[in-house]
Image: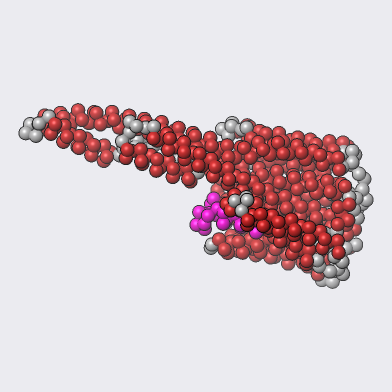
Amino acid sequence: MNAAGTANMPGAGRHGTILVIGAMCLGIFLCMLDTTIMNITLPAIQTGLDTDLNSLSWALNVYTILFAALSIPLGRVAEIVGMHHTYIMGLAVFLLGSLGSGLAWGLAPLIAFRAMQSLGAAIVFPSSMTIGISSASLQSRTGVIAALGVTQGLASALGPVIGGVLTQYLGWRWVFFVNLPLGLLALVVCLTQLRIKGEPKVKAGIDWAGSLLLMASLFSLVLALIQGSTWGWASPAIIALFIVAAIGLAAFVAAERRARSPMIDLRLFANRQFVGSSIVMLVGYFFLIGVTVLLPTFFTKIQGTSELKAALLVTPVSLLIFLVTPISGLLLAKIGPRILLAAGFAALTGGYLLLGHMDPTVLVQVITAGALVGAGFGMIVAPLTILSAADFTGELLTASQSVIGVIGRIGIVLAVAVFVTTLTGNIATQRTAAIADTKATVDSLTSLPQQTRDILLKESLASIESGATKTSAIPTSHVTPAQRQQLIDANTRKAIVEQHLEQAPESVKSQVAAQVAIQVDKEIKHTNETVNAAIATIKTQATTRFEAAFTSIYSIGACVIPFGLATIFLFPRKKASGKQ
């Protein structure tokens, strides 16, 4: 039995075991929640810290990169130092990072505290998997593995929902503060239920070379994906980063083959079922995060909805994951992994197809698409968490869960990098086109004074640059009462001079002023109608283009997802009984 075995826990009875598994699920929930909870609140953080979105994205990236790169080596450290002791330390570090992130006074402190959070999460996540699996009896181990796996996907999907609600009612800092009460609850359970003093320790080395190579490879790959559209995909810097990533990965594999205590036991990948689980886990998280990251941004920035409404609109994703995952776990033994995974891929594809052709005003389309994505992910994640462990025992069982967890994190890293980068490029392209459309529309308004056209162009371009084309209201009048009176006075003086009425009685001049006022009001009405029609056209054109920047991503995704069906042949027709 390893260092986290049931025999090492003070309350090894049924009640104590349930508490421990619950605490491990809570730890995993917090770690995974923080991979996506920031996404919907980025605009609020951007405003609060007065920074740009590209720089702020590193508060997301630093968490996912370090989390993915450090989980396995720190999991090994936990086995050597003592799993329970290290877990509690990791949870404390995570909570301190959460507190610091919530109190951050600038971008640099936020990124630093997010890195601290990630360090804690990289300890908590693999330790939670190991302690949770080891605390269960052999008969119930499959169910525990499924529960731990479900928690991962559910937390990732719930992140934007919880983030939207907290931002709407309490402010963006609460997306970090929310970790504190939940984390303290898990900490209390661990202090009372886990054996801290005198727990057995594993005698093994730490593969620091492998850890550094993997981190360098991941960092280079993600940086290239994030900066590709800014620096240019063919630029020397981006090409160099891709080369470093490839060389780093090759060197990592070579180092693992020679290492006495490899960070990743390559024997895992000799198992077809584990290879298939790894690929599908990567793909599943990639396409799940593609929805939970971009869709809230689409509704808040383009459709002008509140963070709360945007969060509610992506709730079907989380709800269907919660409902479908346990059912798919039960169906696995009856129909086998191939049919279940094929159905999952089909549902994901259907969801992406709907999102790629959605009318954002028809909420049933959005809800249905989210439900399909959640159901598809739910049909994938439960079988994978079971299948990835089915053929392993002992240390390989623990290693399989650490590796499969890290692969899921890599899927999240790649999803954030690829989807956000693609969206950024799409928006830049559509913004340029929208600006050209706007200039053409304004230039066609020859009946308006040049000054009015200049003002209209300036305001329209500012709206397009800010992305507020949907939210900005069209004013009823573009001429203020003071401006109207100035026009009447100027035109009245002009009419009096032209008609040689300078010496005429005031009553005559008043009649002239009244006639001028009528004409000015007609011209103002024409101006308002013309400008409002132009604004409506500009808004429609720009909104349509910005919507296309989002929907085109999902259309492409719907074409790519079906290729994942090829992986189902790596799995047996029926569920392998495995070794428990």
In the rendering, at what x and y percent does residue 85 appear?
78, 67
Residue at 76%, 57% in the rendered image: 249
Q: Quadrant of residue 552?
A: top right
Q: Is residue 481 visible?
A: yes
Above or below residue 217? Residue 458 is above
In the rendering, at what x and y percent does residue 108 appear?
57, 63
Q: Quadrant of residue 267?
A: bottom right
Residues in magenta? 43-65
Residue nearest the viewer, comparing 578 with 236: 236
Residue at 86%, 43% in the rendered image: 570
In the rendering, at what x and y percent does residue 239 appear?
66, 54
Residue nearest the viewer, comparing 18 with 386: 386
Residue at 35%, 38% in the rendered image: 453
Q: Is residue 351 visible?
A: no
Above or below residue 275? Residue 510 is above
Q: Identify the colour scheme used.
A: secondary structure
In the rendering, at what x and y percent does residue 513 appear?
17, 32
State the quadrant of the N terminus: bottom right
Above or below residue 32? Residue 196 is below
On whether residue 53 falls in the magenta region, the answer is yes
Residue at 70%, 65% in the rendered image: 92
In the drawing, does residue 510 fall left or right of residue 536?
left
On whether residue 135 falls in the magenta region, the answer is no
Q: Quadrant of residue 356?
A: top right
Q: Main secondary structure of the magenta part?
A: helix
Q: How many marks?
A: 0
Residue found at the far left of this picture: 503
